[in-house]
Each structure stands twice: as C-alpha cells, then as structure tokens.
Image (cartoon, rainbow, N blue to C red):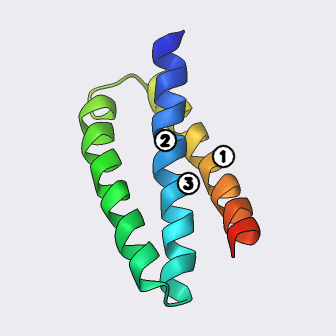
Amino acid sequence: MDNKLSLFAAGYVQVLLIAINTWQIAHSYFIGAFIVALLISLVWTYNVKRISLSSMTDRFLYSFGAAFGTLSGMGIVKVLY
C-alpha cells in the first residue's frame, strides 16, 4: 500500500507544481517561476524512472494523483496570490 500511495503522491506533487508554475509564468512572477520550474524538473527525474516500467494500475494511480494535483495547485494560487 505504501508504494501505491507513493505513486499517487508522485503524480500529485509534480502536477501541483506545474499548475502553480503555469500561473506564475502567466502573471510574470519570474523568481517564483524559476524556483518552481527547478522543483518540477527534480520531481520529474524521480517520477520518470518510477513510472516508466509500471503496471496500468500504477499508471492510473499516478495519473489520478496528477489530476488532484491540478485542482490543489489551482486552489493554492488562489490563496497565495
């Protein structure tokens, strides 16, 4: 179960950061966009290795986490900015 939650969290964190970064870019927050882009790249290097040879169930869990990350990222930028 820990592995399944970990896959969900991996997708969640990456797309959460992408949603935040997209807003920062659209609103010209250069420093924030730079920092978050760096974090996205670091998370991505971890995620690619984990998900590339996984089962369809694992890919679905990862994608479900990513979808929730999008919603959370949208909510976070509403609160922060």
Dot 1 surroundings within 10 Å: few (below 14), some, or many (20 or more)?
Answer: some
- Disc 2 is placed on an element classified as helix
Does residue 16 sit above or below 9 in this rendering? below
Q: Amino acid at mark 2?
A: Gly
Circle nearer the N terminus (2, 1)? 2
- Disc 3 is placed on an element classified as helix
Residue bearing mark 1: 68
Dot 2 surroundings within 10 Å: few (below 14), some, or many (20 or more)?
Answer: many
On the picture, is 72 further left or further right than 9? right
Q: Amino acid at mark 1?
A: Phe
Which label sits on residue 16? 3
Where on the picture, by quarter, is residue 38?
A: bottom left
Q: Residue furthest bottom?
A: 28
Residue 8: x, y in percent? Answer: 54, 31
Q: Amino acid at mark 3?
A: Leu
Does residue 25 sit above or below 68 in this rendering? below
Residues at marks 2 and 1, CA–CA distance in whole angstroms: 9 Å
Q: Residue at x 24, y 45 (%)?
A: 45
- Disc 1 is placed on an element classified as helix
Q: Residue at x 58, y 39 (%)?
A: 65
Does residue 33 sit above or below 13 in this rendering? below
Residue bearing mark 2: 11
Circle nearer the N terminus (3, 2)? 2
Q: Residue at x 69, y 76 (%)?
A: 81
Q: Nearer the viewer, mark 3 or mark 1?
A: 3
Residue 1: x, y in percent? Answer: 54, 9
Residues at marks 3 and 1, CA–CA distance in whole angstroms: 8 Å
Residue 69: x, y in percent? Answer: 60, 49
Which label sits on residue 24? none
Residue 80: x, y in percent? Answer: 69, 69
Q: Residue at x 47, y 28 (%)?
A: 7
- Nearest the viewer among 64 and 46 is 46
